[in-house]
Image (cartoon, rainbow, N blue to C red):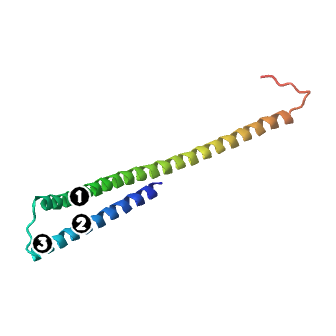
Amino acid sequence: MFGSLNNMLEHIKEVELETIELSKESLMKLSTFLEKNSIEIDDDVATALQYQDIISQQLSATIEAIEYVQGTLNVFKHAFDEDEKIASQSMGKLQDKLESALVKAKDRKSAFKGKLENTDEDEIEFF
């Protein structure tokens, strides 16, 4: 699950990085065109160019948020894996102890049963 989520976040990050690059290329081509043709921009075009820059900045902020989430997920996954490993080891130790206790209980039962089988019925023993 963690791997799938991380892969999805990584894909979103790559798409956003590509979008930022396309936006930069677009801005550079537009700027070159305006300069080459000596075209002055009006307030609306200046606002549009600022919007394009704001969009790139927002995508960068989203990438930073994704990287933070990925880091947090990696820490959680590591802790989860370690906890799972510790739990598995503890269950193994518990199983070993239970099996040992069962063997001892069976041995005691056999020992007690053996004493009952080896006694003569006519014989009474006093303490």
Q: Which residue is mark 3?
A: 34
As helix, strand or loop, the secondary structure at mark 2 comes to helix
Which is nearer the eye, 10 or 26? 26
Which of the 4 image quarters holds residue 21? bottom left
Q: Which residue is mark 1?
A: 55
User: Closest to the observer: 77 or 97?
Assistant: 77
Given residues 22 and 82, the one toward you in this image is 22
Residue at 46%, 52% in the rendered image: 81
Marks 2 and 3, the one that precedes in the sequence: 2
Quadrant in the rendering for residue 110: top right
Residue 124 picture location, percent across and down: 86, 24
Question: Is disc 2 in contact with disc 1, using a CB cutoff of under 8 Å?
Answer: yes
Q: Position of residue 103 (x, y in %)?
A: 70, 43
Judge from the rendering whether residue 32 lies leftward or rightward of residue 71; answer left or right: left
Residue at 66 percent across and 44 percent down: it is 99
Most distant residue in the top direction: 126
What's under tag 3, amino acid-wise? Leu
| Cα–Cα gap, marks 1 and 3 | 21 Å
Residue 23: mark in rendering: 2
* Mark nearer the N terminus (2 vs 1): 2
Q: Secondary structure at mark 1?
A: helix
Looking at this view, is 108 or 28 the one in front?
A: 28
Q: Is residue 58 above or below residue 87?
A: below
For badge 2, the amino acid type reads Ser
Residue drawn where x is 17% and y is 70% of the image = 30
Residue 9 on image: x %, y %: 38, 58
Residue 108 numbered mark, or none: none
- SS at circle 3: helix
- Looking at the rendered structure, the kind of residue marked 1 is Ile
Q: Residues within 10 Å of mark 3 (few under 14, many from 20)?
A: few
